[in-house]
Amino acid sequence: MDFKPLMQTRHSVRSFRNELLSEELLNEVLEAGRLAPTAVNKQPFVFIVVNDPEKLKEIHEAYPREWFRKAPQVIVICGDHDAAWKRGIDGKDHTDIDVAIATDHVTLRAAELGLGTCWVCNFEPSKVTKALSLPEHIEPTVLLPIGRPEEAEIPPKKRKPLTDLVRFNGY
């Protein structure tokens, strides 16, 4: 698929078929995240695929929404603050930026393969940290339910016009 139609059709999916993806298919989307550009090529992230039903229940408690409870698997994308590049002049930690780029690559590859995803950032990190026994320097940043979508129709995108978002040579 060409990139333009891919970015126009990728959308948040909140209704999945009750089937696990194969390890091969999961690796396809995770490889896209691995290949994402990162600051100084540090790759300060970890992808944790959660597909065990008992472990999923614990993850679902961090974001207790009915549609999320029905997701057959979730990729927990974590930032590794110890591995991240920090800008020398002010110490800015680029973990969140690198995680976001990797997550976007995963979602786009998933869409290209006919899979659905939905970024979830509004969750209780402490519950995810506990459920996955994450060390202190690893931060759960994105919960990404992934699977085959039940819905067939792609909703129209609601976005601001480009003229509201672009400036030249200053604000």
Image (spheres, rainbow, N blue to C red):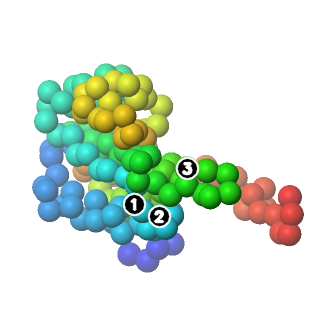
Residue 46 position, x and y percent, is 32, 50
* First in sequence: mark 1 vs mark 3: 1
Whether residues under marks 3 and 2 lie with C-beta atoms below 8 angstroms apart, the answer is: no
**How many dots with numbers?**
3
Whether residues under marks 2 and 1 lie with C-beta atoms below 8 angstroms apart, the answer is: yes
Tell me if mark 3 has few (under 14), some (14-19) or many (20+) residues whose alpha carbon lies within 10 angstroms of its own.
some
* First in sequence: mark 2 vs mark 1: 2
SS under mark 2: loop
Spatial CA span between label 2 and label 1? 6 Å
Q: Quadrant of residue 66?
A: top left
Residue at x-position 49% and y-position 67%: 40
Identify which residue, 122 or 82, lies in the foreground: 82
Check disc 3 and report the residue beneath it. Answer: 93
Residue 39 in view: yes
- Picture disc at residue 95: none
- Picture disc at residue 43: 1
- Picture disc at residue 38: 2
SS under mark 3: loop
Identify which residue, 145 or 11, lies in the foreground: 145
Residue 107 in view: no
The mark closer to the camera, 3 or 2, is 3
The residue type indicated by label 1 comes to: Gln
